[in-house]
Structure formats: structure tokens, C-alpha cells
Amino acid sequence: MKYLDLDAQFDSVSRHLGKPRRIEKADLSGDIYVGYYYRRVIVFKNNRTGRISAFHICDSSFATNRGLRIGDSKTRMVALYGNGRVQKEYGSIGPHDYTFHDYSEATEFNLGDYHVIFFTKAQRVVRMVFFTRVSMTADDFNMGFLKLGAPFDSVVVRLGKPDSITSSDWGSIGYWYPKVVVWRDDANGTLFAMDIYDSSFVTARGLKVGDSLAKLEWLYRDCDWETRPFERIGPYDYTFTDYSEYAVIESYLILFMREGRLVKILSYIGVWD
């Protein structure tokens, strides 16, 4: 799409568009993804690579390679792209913390090396989002300032005094707080695991306690994961009678659900199966 090429160096955008109206970091992914807001387009840069990771088209002056523009009908979209995956409940896309309140429907297409989502309202295309496939990284297993493998003392400084402390049979010590339990690896003094019950802690992709199964499927659609009835997980010999099922994301991010809603997030360093 003109000079906007996913995974291209961001310098090409600066040369064509000049100074943006504002620059914002993606709230839920630290300083990795930065949004550059122009009048007609929003471009996201991966700060680690300096490349374009996503862009939003908000203006009819841009056309896709197949000729679709903002304002075109949903019928034309289907004629050009076929039937994609329709999503009516959404809040975020990948690591980009977007909230879409003004659209009635989103349709996603996997076009090989990239994805495109067309947002429609009243049967008209009102926004286009192009983004590269987001692979799981170490950040996906962290929760805000809770970073697996970090020195445990730094965690306690942020959380304060726990309600209780318990030891486990596998060499970890649990620090129990009202809405989170953090586990210390007794051998090296690092954060080994975390149990999250509080919606104030959010994954790098934007998932939090209270979210729906539909949102989980939307955010982690490009990951290796499955849902199944709960029995037991790794070294954690717990009995979870309050949960109906759970989803395992890339082995070590476990999401517990009850009646289609997320009620707990367990993330841990995978040293046992």
C-alpha cells in the first residue's frame, strides 16, 4: 500500500509523512510497540527492530493492492477478499492495545505473511488494520512488572508484605497476596511462577481476568493452544474445584475459566511437565 510495507524500515514512513501529530507507546507491551499518529493513518513501529509492525488506514485516499478503500461496501470487500473470519467481540489485536467501540463487526483475513482486518459499520468499511503475525515471546508470559526470572526481592518491593508465606515440595516458596500469588525459586532467588486473580494485571496481548473465551481466542489465535477439562498442571498439585476448564498457551501460560470467563491466569517457568 504505497510506501506502507509491513516489516519495512520505519524510516520510509518518516520520509513520506513527516512529523506525526502524536506518538504513543502501546500501554500493555512496554516500550516495544510505538504508535505514530498521522491525520490519515496510524503506523506502529517495533522499537526493537525499527520496522513497521502494523498500520491503520482511516482515509479513502489509500487503497489496498486489491483496490479496497474506506467507504466501500461490505459486499465489495467480500467480492475482493472472500469470506474471512468474522469477530463481533474484540478489544485488542496482538500487542497493540486498541479499543474499538465504534464498529459493528471485524473481519480478519490471513494473507500469508500478514493479516488484515476490515472494520465495518452500517455495511461499510470504516477502518483497515494491517499487521504482521505476532509470535509468542518471553514478554507473553509476564504480567506487568511481574517478570518471570526476575530477582524476587524486586517483586516483593512492589507488592509489599504478603498475607502469608508457604513452602512447596518442589523447592519454591509462595508469597500470598489478596489477588496474586508469586512463587520464589529457592535455589536462585528469582520469580518462578505467578497466580493472577486480579484484572489489574494484564498480559502483553491485552488479556485479563474477567475477559471472555471469545476474546482469548481472538488474542491468541496465532498460538499453539488448546482447552480441556482441568486435572493437574506441572508441579502444581492443586485441586481447582472452582474452574470448569482451562486453556494452555504454548505450554506455560494457563488460563482458567468458569462459565466462559477467565477467572485466573497461571504463568510459570516450564521446568516440569
Image (cartoon, helix red, strand yellow):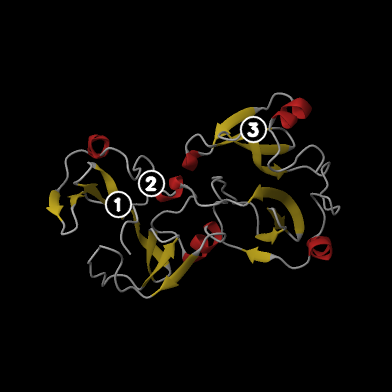
- For mark 3, what is the residue? 36
Q: Amino acid at mark 1?
A: Met
Asked if disc 3 and disc 2 are in contact, CB closer than 8 Å, the reply is no
Numbered-mark total: 3
Using the image as rendered, state which of residue 114 and residue 108 is in the foreground: 114
In-image side of 202 versus 10 (left or right): left
- For mark 2, what is the residue? 143
Q: Residue 134 in the image: x percent, y percent?
A: 57, 50
In-image side of 97 versus 120 (left or right): left
Asked if disc 3 and disc 1 are in contact, CB closer than 8 Å, the reply is no
- For mark 1, what is the residue? 194
* In the image, residue 261 above or below residue 114: below
Q: Residue 107 in the image: x percent, y percent?
A: 68, 61
Q: Alpha carbon of mark 3 to alpha carbon of mark 2: how far?
A: 25 Å
Q: Residue 158 in the image: x percent, y percent?
A: 27, 36
Element marked by disc 1: strand
Asked if disc 2 and disc 1 are in contact, CB closer than 8 Å, the reply is yes
Q: Amino acid at mark 2?
A: Met
